[in-house]
Image: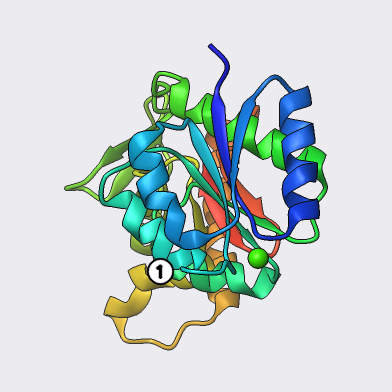
Amino acid sequence: MDKKILIVEDEPKIAALLRDYLVQSGYQTAHLDRGDEVERWVLENPVDLLLLDLMLPGKDGLEVCKGLRRFSTAPIIMITARVEEIDRLLGLELGADDYVCKPFSPREVVARVKAVLRRIGAPPPEPSVVLDEAGYKASIAGKDLGLTAVEFKMLRKMVYQPGRIFSRDRLMDVMYSDQRIVSERTVDSHIKKLRKKIATVMPEREIVHSVYGVGYKYEG
Ligand code: CA
């Protein structure tokens, strides 16, 4: 059966554009233009995925997302008008699965929809990284990566939620314990070393990906 996607968007042109592209790609769609109608609607009409605009009349996308997460595990792609907003949204741990920034290309949105649905529907992949929690060690195919404690903690944070994007702020949390002031650049430098170590034992593919302007994610 076709997957059903709920578009929550108060700008009629954008909603129509999304609907056209999604229908062309073989999805069923439904559309709401107010935030305060979403939860009741989803309770009565199960959906496979939601595209949820942040600024909505009635109830904003943040509150809608939080409300939905109380009873629904349907994947949510948040749509925001500002790229800077994404970092703040990530920090709020809303439980959204992906974020798209306006203005977007509808093709890009369809690609994200497909990727999220694929990720949800696929059996969890064999983890390529094995974590030894007690020893703060990580290995790939039996080879120890030789990580520092900070690198290990950053990797662990991402490995536990594959596909989820972590902002630099979120990754910085793992360093608070050592009392030093850390900058986003510090995070980048740890991640760079971590990736280098991974590439040494597994040069054929990347598992820690940088998401431009947003942060990092693990996809094993
Ligand atoms: Ca809006």
Dot 1 alpha-carbon crowd within 10 angstroms: few under 14, some 14 to 19, many 20 or more: few
Mark 1 = which residue? Answer: 92
Tell me where residue 61 appears, x and y as whole percent. Answer: 50, 63
Is label 1 in a helix, a strand or a loop?
loop
| Residue nearest the observer in this picture, 104 or 55 | 55
Instruction: Please identify the quarter of the rendering in which residue 25 is found.
Output: top right
Rendered residue at 74%/42% (across/down): 18
| Residue nearest the observer in this picture, 138 or 106 | 106
Rendered residue at 21%/46% (across/down): 133
Q: How is the image coloured?
A: rainbow
From this view, report whether residue 138 is shown above or below residue 69. Answer: above
Rendered residue at 72%/60% (across/down): 11
Please state if 170 lies on the left or on the right of 81 as rendered: left
Q: Is mark 1 within 8 Å of ligand 1?
A: no
Tell me where residue 32 appears, x and y as whole percent. Answer: 57, 49
Quadrant where ligand 1 appears: bottom right
Identify the amino acid type marked 1. Answer: Leu
Name the residue furthest left: 134
From this view, report whether residue 114 is shown above or below residue 96. Answer: above
From this view, report whether residue 154 is shown above or below residue 126. Answer: below
Rendered residue at 60%/73% (across/down): 85
Instruction: Please identify the quarter of the rendering in which residue 73 is found.
Output: top left
Tell me where residue 60 appears, x and y as whole percent. Answer: 49, 69
From this view, report whether residue 193 is shown above or below residue 188. Answer: above
Please state if 154 lies on the left or on the right of 177 as rendered: right
Tell me where residue 181 appears, x and y as whole percent. Answer: 43, 88
